Image (spheres, rainbow, N blue to C red):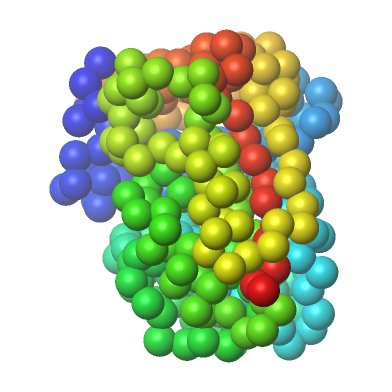
Amino acid sequence: MSASILAPRDYYNLDPVGAKRDLTGAGTLAYITQDQLHPPMVDDEEIWQDGRRWHEGSIMHTLDAAALCEFHPGQTVLDIGGGVGGPARLLVDYFDVDVVCTSISEEQLKTCQRINASKPAWKYHIKTMTHDCQKPFIRTNFNCVWSMNMLYHIESKLDMLQNARRSLDKGGRLMIDDWMLTPRATQYDRKVLGHHFISSHFAVREDILSLIASSGFRISHFQELGHIGRTHLAHHFTEQFDKHFRKMIIESNPEYGPSIAEHFCDAITATIDLYLQEKLTYCRILAIKE
């Protein structure tokens, strides 16, 4: 299945599948994890065995990452690659922080702004901005730089990390939550992922840890979540996807829906294979600006 069926630039921006759920820019995930554009990497069998709870699981995932950051009311967060703003809204609701939500996708930011306008706290405490994290940000006094499930889109991880450090106040925190390759991964594995996810920039776990440490951060927390991909995801994805989501995706767009659903299923199956071979993992990292 050609990756271009899933996301040529013009189709991705229009996103008729996500638009059917009023989540343009979220794509297929609009049906699965909704405004949380990351998998529910929670070690909870009951959630994984019921696809209708995967959105709940993705919220738990976000809040687990946020708990590490020790937020205080009034603190400021730079959310790089914030998607349609789901995590940012949770940070406002649960921790009373201010968030600048950035993306290079205008459609995602438009969706984020529209949803934010529906609640005064979101409208007031979340600002949106088009920005590439490989370039310096205009502000330099954030308490936290937050990066969730977007690292594989970034070509220069070094530029991202150096700009994150510049954006942080003294003692500020960097939170990275993402899937990464292990040293077992081959160039062929990269090609497989690139075919399915339109990116050739997947990070290697050890390389990211080394880059973070050499970019002026002290790593204070490292958590490996790859076992969830090898167990819960591997055991339940296909059955739950077919049971709860495939039909909805197809009905959302009769012309493209069948191909999109099949491609999404193929993509996740490919990642499961890499998880099982321990070529792919999922990591949560908290680092402090030195």
| Above or below for 214 versus 162 | above
Residue 272 located left or right of residue 258: right
Q: Position of residue 122 (x, y in %)?
A: 61, 77
Vertical comparison of 212 with 246: above or below: below
Q: Nearer the viewer, residue 215 or 56?
A: 215
Residue at horizontal 72 percent and vertical 35 percent from the top: 224
Quadrant of the image occupied by residue 142: bottom right
**Where in the figure is residue 134, as x and y percent of width and height?**
35, 65
Residue drawn at 58 percent across, 79 percent down: 168
Give the residue displayed 64% in from the left and 60% down from the top.
175
Task: Give left or right: position of 274 versus 50.
Answer: left
Q: Quarter of the image containing the C terminus?
A: bottom right
Residue 256 image-quadrant placement: top left
User: Is residue 103 visible to us here?
Assistant: no
Q: Quadrant of the N terminus?
A: top left
Q: Position of residue 127 (x, y in %)?
A: 49, 81
Q: Is residue 261 above or below residue 164?
A: above
Q: How many marks?
A: 0
Q: Which quarter of the picture shows residue 202?
A: top left
Closer to us: 107 or 153: 153
Figure check: 93 above or below 40:
below
Q: Residue 3 appears at what percent x and percent y?
A: 25, 27
Res. 273 visible in picture: yes
Residue closest to the eye, 132 or 121: 132
Residue at horizontal 82 percent and vertical 69 percent from the top: 70
